[in-house]
Amino acid sequence: MTSTDGAGRTRPVTITDIARVTGVVPSTVSRALNKPGRVSAATRARIQAAARELNYVPNSQARALISGRTGTIAVLVSDVTNPFYFGLIRGAQQRLKAAGYAQLLIDTEDSGAHEAEMLHKMRRSLDGAILTASRLPERELATLAGQIPLVTVNRNVRGVQSVVIDTPTGIGLAVEHLVGLGHRDIVYVAGPDNSWSNHARWRAMCTAGLRRGRRFRRVGPFPRGRGSGAAVADAVLTSGATACVCFNDLFAIGMLPRLRQRGVRVPEDLSVVGCDDIFGADFSHPPLTTLAAPIQQAGEVAVSMLLARLEHPTTEQTRPAVILPATLTVRESTGPAPTSAAPQPEYGAD
Amino acid sequence: MTSTDGAGRTRPVTITDIARVTGVVPSTVSRALNKPGRVSAATRARIQAAARELNYVPNSQARALISGRTGTIAVLVSDVTNPFYFGLIRGAQQRLKAAGYAQLLIDTEDSGAHEAEMLHKMRRSLDGAILTASRLPERELATLAGQIPLVTVNRNVRGVQSVVIDTPTGIGLAVEHLVGLGHRDIVYVAGPDNSWSNHARWRAMCTAGLRRGRRFRRVGPFPRGRGSGAAVADAVLTSGATACVCFNDLFAIGMLPRLRQRGVRVPEDLSVVGCDDIFGADFSHPPLTTLAAPIQQAGEVAVSMLLARLEHPTTEQTRPAVILPATLTVRESTGPAPTSAAPQPEYGAD
DNA sequence: ATGAAAGCGCTAACAA
DNA sequence: TTGTTAGCGCTTTCAT
């Protein structure tokens, strides 16, 4: 694995070492290792044996310096601790590993500026990047896409390949479910304004409402994260709605203890729908009805699109965008609307 | 950011471009940018201005080729989707970013072979690595530590810097809590045999038992993951114990639905203690009493130890191991032992 | 204070 | 089929 130099310190094995041992020149070693067809069987065997024996590992920096390919793909997420990304990261990781790429995980801390800065700085060390929930303005994103192969997830910008979840249909399913249960007054709990998904979901709510001649309201926006749960619960209660659709499961899960504390039963008094079907949505109390997105698949598809482009740069991109279906997972946080005759539960003073 | 060559294609800006523009030689540019003190104020200003104007970004591959430093630290986890790692990854990420390093996240899929292979292949592209829950045998780990700066988390091997959670004290706390509640028959639910933490926890259980003149039993081992929940629940029930300490929260959370389904009330009929206090442990039904480890801090400390070594290679390492205290977070999954007079609940046939 | 030159490890023309 | 040469972008002697 290492050879010993005069000082007794170890030094990584290079093709020059192998060349010396096998009595050929470095470029021959390079060929033997990379384009085995262009070297005689005998020398190839000798060289490969020596390489194995010395435990040679190519220096990817040196290789990258010439080829410009680093074998590294960045995956940018807005917050590594958001369980939403687990599946995505895993899906991406699996495909990348299978293709021999490394995954550089970057937490943008929910800031477009961070995002741009990191991408810019690392541009040269990356073969491409997957942007989940990008906070960048469209123009900047399009510019960036011209400099480094990019695939976005849940963000649709003209000229940038993307994987998006079919929010309109998904939200439609959720609304239909709630309306079917007799809910007439449904409120959307908005997430941060800089979230594309948040806007997509609210827009879909409006559309779904329009189709039924209703106008749904919204409360918020609330800051990302479970910490908003109490405020969300209070806002929904104040709104007087009998059901809410939350920007994400973190909000929905965060609401539950506050609702319980206030004596509001879920789903008897209030139906709650989340989005994303994150880890925990199935064992919260009660388990959450939620819009499930095939997020691991999104990670896989995003990587596939990116690698396809990297490895067949000539081929025209047939699919600028892949749309993945969302499904509604019905659990126990939604139920029939309380009959309007029944008195509203009394909420104790805060 | 890019200069245009004859063909109209853009090409990254190099120090040579800056040199041409400012009328100096590339090495002067290099100096101006890296050792500002060794260049006249005037030229330095000119060069820095030009660099900014051209939006120059250093090529880290080229730099790494010479210096051997890549500015990248690998963080190896056995399973990216295990919520246990969220805090760890985030803690590491924060410290790394603050120090200007990039985090390469590697999923070893719970395999020591994978782990060794990845580390070996990427050895040259890394400045160091953090191994969480390493599956490698001690010897191999020690060897590896000689080749690449390493810090382990939750794995203590002589000669390798490590961050470990104080399992004995933590488990002691849990046992004390249960014994205080009147439990005499406590069973440990074992995780995978290749987990160092699993052994540490079981050993700590034995010690804690010995101190009280008791011998606790164990069931398992069970395969990692929430999927084992049903089997775990059945095994614990069969054991007849009134309380169990689970290898991790995933097991504990996984047990709950099965127990409910079998009519076993938690904590009235059975007390359940988890380990790790992962995301979800506070909103499971019932919320979990669990051994909370400052895992984000573990990530931070591991990075700090690693970077300290990288940046002050001469200084002797004062602390080969950092031990972080575990605390017991008492929630609602533990309660007084059922009085032995009371009839055991009947478990319906499966 | 700046320039000239060499070289990190590897690959890719081009020659032989 | 193999060797020779040059160069990727940068840093680092060594001169000047």
Image: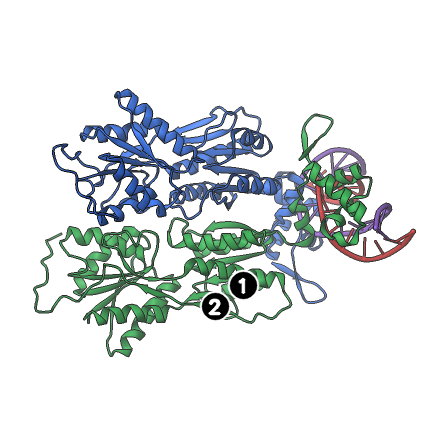
Chain colours: A blue, B green, C purple, D red
Q: Residue at x 81, y 50 (%)?
A: B40
Residue A221 shows in this picture: yes
Looking at the picture, tell me which residue is in the foreground, A103 or A268: A268
Residue A297 x, y percent position in the rendering: 39, 37
Q: Residue at x 46, y 30 (%)?
A: A162
Name the amino acid, label 2.
Val
Which mark identifies residue B322?
Answer: 2
Residue that label 1 marks: B305
Name the amino acid, label 1.
Met
Quadrant for residue B209, please give it: bottom left
- C-beta proximity under 8 Å, tags 2 and 1: yes
Quadrant for residue A123, please give it: top right
- Local secondary structure at mark 2: strand
Which quadrant: the N terminus of chain A? bottom right
Residue A349 x, y percent position in the rendering: 23, 47
Lower position in the chain sequence, tag 2 or tag 1? 1
Is A294 left, or right, of B271 in this rendering? right
